[in-house]
Image (cartoon, coloured by chain):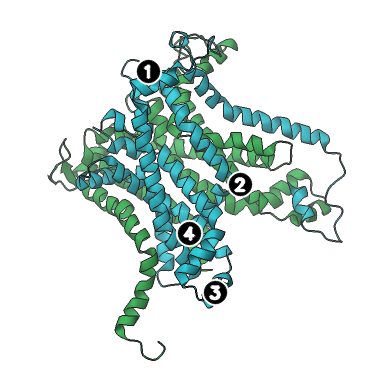
């Protein structure tokens, strides 16, 4: 095949990769790329209640969206929700990873407990907390009542009826379900650090906190970065927790962009699509910033 | 852990890796702390089981434990709500998505691990994109596209969507496994007269079996637990044919919630996936992070 490369053959050679990766590309096209096109298209369309398209209406959907009285609150809350949950998750995960990296009897069993919120449907975990916060019989309220902090059945015990407390509890649930992945990601980072690094540090007389701060943390940087990125994406897009615990209410006072988008979809698909486009653009910005800071391309090419 | 790691790198220059046993006090403290954390992680799910086992007339008692534990909520699920149909739907979706991921991700992961071709980086970036963009971010597009397809039931749509968004995990983990298997093994088989595809099936796939199992279980669990797209596409479906995660929400009425049945169904939905997840626990992180750190 060296000297006589027929055109047919060279086409065949160029097409060989397609044979292997073609099915994957086709699936991505149908499930990821085309929906994006439809979504962007929908954001410029007037769409009737039954889902049929009435016609193009330019930027009207975006205008309607920007005039929604709840929008600024929703955007601000999305920021607080994402940053708050991710930061708290990462801090606790660093501590948990350090703990579960120690050797102690029954470590495997203890780690299994850690994975349950990860394996279980987030929606079901959210419902457990909704029940546990029930104002008259929820187990969290029963416990707080026994501690003398809350009176069962009182307004104070109706945590999810108060937008501020509802956000607090929902962020706590979001941290809870995010911890297993982050902890495991940092654990695997810890296990990748060669032991002689610590020996060198301890020979230099570093205390354990100093060697953690100056040896472990810098070496954990890649693991922390990836875990943070994946958490940001997950928490930003999170739907089941808020949907199951407050439906974003009362009003839209506990909605983030994702839940708000689903809520307004029933009334105005076009407007919901325009919010999705904004949501989507934000995710792209996050991912690009990430790819740039980690020099992703150089790594896959290597 | 540092002690185990140091034993793996013996050197004449460093002091004995395992320090003398002054650490028992620390080990006890660590053990207690770790078990306390484990209990905290378990508590919500213990409560799930306790509520599922509470008789209806005790539901509103402000007590930690039911006075009489009952399995009534579990047994009546099958007659009243028809949970069997929901489990069947969820099984179809999860098994379908898992099979599709296998068919699509296996060749892609193998080829990108073995060959450097034009467009490889672009392809891997595309795969990474599917991992980063979750269905929630493009829900309106998904709903309108798949409604336009007018498929007979949402099951096929959900299989495609769950497979599409979980494929990345399978590609990363399989890619890592294939890369770690020496090409020479396949070449030796090919010298013995195997074709490339045959060498892949006979030599490489068996060696990559742990990765394949991890990818399959992970996809299965994700599809089984998926909620938002299932909820969106199942609008108007018969309640007994809805996926399990959507059906569980049917216990939430406008004025009251049937917590006992809701959590009984949740327990049934959760137990199998927790067991499956425990099997792949140690490899999952690799699949989730490999794409972003490769």
Chain B colour is cyan
Q: Based on the displayed image, in which of its 4 quarters is residue B263 positioned?
A: top left
C-alpha span from label 2 to label 1: 39 Å
Q: Mark 4 highlights which residue?
A: A292
Q: Mark 3 highlights which residue?
A: B187
Q: Looking at the image, is mark 4 or mark 2 earlier in the sequence?
A: 2
Q: Position of residue B200 (x, y in %)?
A: 49, 66
Give the class, few, some or many, for how many residues have Cα within 10 Å of label 1's Cα (few <14, many ≥20).
Answer: some
Give the class, few, some or many, for how many residues have Cα within 10 Å of label 2's Cα (few <14, many ≥20).
Answer: many
C-alpha span from label 2 to label 3: 37 Å
Kindly report which numbered mark, 2 or 3, lies closer to the viewer in this rendering.
3
Q: Which mark is residue A12?
A: none
C-alpha span from label 3 to label 1: 62 Å
Q: Mark 2 highlights which residue?
A: A186
Q: Which mark is residue B257?
A: 1
Q: Based on the displayed image, in which of its 4 quarters is residue A108 positioned?
A: top right
- SS class, disc 4: helix
């Amino acid at each position: 095949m060296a000297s006589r490369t027929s055109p047919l053959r060279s086409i065949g050679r160029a097409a060989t990769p397609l044979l292997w990766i073609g099915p994957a590309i086709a699936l991505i096209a149908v499930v990821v790329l085309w929906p994006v096109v439809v979504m962007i298209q929908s954001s410029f369309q007037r769409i009737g209640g039954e889902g049929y398209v009435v016609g193009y209406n330019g930027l009207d959907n975006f205008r309607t969206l920007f005039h929604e009285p709840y929008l600024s609150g929703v955007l601000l809350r999305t920021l607080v929700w994402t940053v708050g949950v991710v930061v708290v998750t990462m801090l606790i995960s660093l501590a948990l990873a350090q703990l579960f990296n120690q050797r102690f009897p029954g470590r495997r069993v203890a780690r299994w407990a850690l994975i349950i919120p990860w394996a279980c449907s987030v929606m079901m975990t959210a419902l457990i907390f909704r029940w546990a916060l029930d104002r008259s019989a929820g187990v969290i309220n029963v416990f707080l009542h026994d501690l003398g902090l809350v009176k069962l059945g009182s307004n104070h015990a109706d945590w999810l009826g108060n937008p501020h407390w509802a956000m607090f509890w929902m962020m706590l649930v979001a941290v809870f379900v995010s911890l297993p992945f982050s902890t495991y990601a940092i654990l695997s980072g810890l296990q990748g650090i060669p032991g002689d690094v610590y020996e060198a540090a301890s020979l230099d007389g570093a205390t354990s906190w100093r060697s953690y701060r100056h040896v472990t943390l810098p070496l954990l940087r890649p693991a922390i970065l990836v875990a943070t990125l994946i958490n940001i994406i997950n928490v930003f897009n999170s739907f089941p927790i808020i949907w199951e615990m407050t439906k974003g209410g009362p009003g839209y006072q506990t909605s983030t962009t994702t839940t708000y988008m689903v809520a307004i979809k029933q009334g105005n698909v076009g407007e919901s699509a325009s919010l999705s486009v904004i949501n989507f653009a934000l995710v792209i910005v996050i991912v690009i910033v990430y790819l740039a800071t980690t020099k992703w391309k150089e790594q896959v090419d290597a | 852990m540092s002690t185990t790691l140091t034993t793996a790198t013996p050197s004449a220059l460093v002091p004995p890796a395992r320090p003398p046993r002054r650490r028992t006090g620390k080990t006890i403290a660590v053990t207690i702390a770790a078990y306390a954390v484990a209990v905290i992680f378990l508590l919500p799910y213990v409560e799930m089981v306790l509520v599922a086992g509470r008789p209806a007339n005790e539901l509103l008692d402000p007590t930690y434990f039911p006075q009489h534990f009952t399995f009534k909520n579990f047994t009546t699920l099958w007659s009243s709500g028809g949970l069997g149909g929901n489990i069947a739907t969820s099984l179809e979706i999860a098994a379908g998505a898992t099979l599709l991921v296998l068919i699509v991700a296996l060749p892609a992961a193998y080829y990108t691990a073995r060959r450097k071709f034009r467009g490889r980086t672009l392809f891997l970036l595309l795969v990474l994109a599917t991992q980063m963009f979750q269905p929630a971010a493009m829900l309106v597009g998904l709903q309108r596209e798949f409604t336009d397809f007018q498929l007979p039931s949402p099951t096929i749509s959900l299989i495609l969507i769950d497979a599409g968004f979980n494929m990345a995990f399978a590609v990363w983990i399989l890619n890592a496994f294939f890369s770690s298997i020496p090409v020479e093994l396949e070449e030796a088989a090919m010298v013995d007269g195997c074709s490339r595809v045959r060498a892949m099936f006979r030599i490489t796939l068996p060696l990559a079996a742990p990765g394949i199992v991890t990818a399959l279980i992970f996809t299965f669990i994700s599809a089984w637990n998926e909620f938002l797209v299932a909820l969106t596409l199942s609008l108007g479906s018969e309640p007994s044919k809805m996926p399990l995660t959507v059906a569980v929400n049917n216990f939430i009425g406008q004025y009251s919630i049937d917590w006992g049945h809701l959590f009984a169904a949740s327990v049934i939905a959760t137990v199998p996936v927790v067991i499956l997840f425990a099997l792949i626990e140690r490899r999952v992180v690799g699949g989730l992070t490999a794409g972003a750190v490769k």
